[in-house]
Image (cartoon, rainbow, N blue to C red):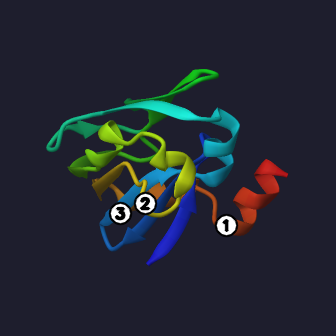
Amino acid sequence: MAIYYSEEHEWLDVDGDTATLGITKHAAEALGEVVFVELQEVGETFVKDDEIGVVESVKAASELYAPVAMEILEANSALEDEPGSVNEDPEGNAWFYKIKVEDTSELANLMDEAAYKAFIA
């Protein structure tokens, strides 16, 4: 398993051609108190940079974008009932999707943890 990061502050924990996708702690802190999460449906497919959801906080609304071409295998519906969990555990239990990565070569365009830390510094 390997973890990748996007410039849009999303993380992907990849195992083969499947991954768990969420937003980073940095993004959750920048958003402030999350009050609403809108997710897409299981089975939907997206190409890189498609909008795949919305996160609203008391400060702003922010779209989520597909970091790679993907199919949604599972959506974390608990976030719709408890959006504040995004602030509590953004890189753990508050994941957004389990996905199938359609083209694993696209992962090469993402950052590893060291590159992401330098990006947000």
The residue identified by callout 3 is 19
Relative image position of residue 76 (x, y in whole percent) = 29, 49
Camera-nearest residue between 106 and 16: 16
Mark 2: give few (<14), some (14-19) or many (20+) Cα within 10 Å: few
* Lower sequence index among marks 1 and 3: 3
User: Alpha carbon of mark 1 to alpha carbon of mark 2: how far?
Assistant: 18 Å
N-term-proximal mark, 3 vs 2: 3
The image shows residue 32 at horizontal and vertical percentages of 65, 35
Q: Circle 1 sits on which residue?
A: 113
Amino acid, disc 3? Ala
Residue pointed to by mark 2: 105
Q: Which residue appears at 29% of the width and 57% of the height?
A: 98
Residue at the image point whose x is 35% and y is 43% from the top? 79
Real-space CA distance between mark 1 and mark 3, rounded to the nearest whole angstrom: 16 Å
Alpha-carbon span between mark 3 and mark 2: 14 Å
Q: Amino acid at mark 2?
A: Ser
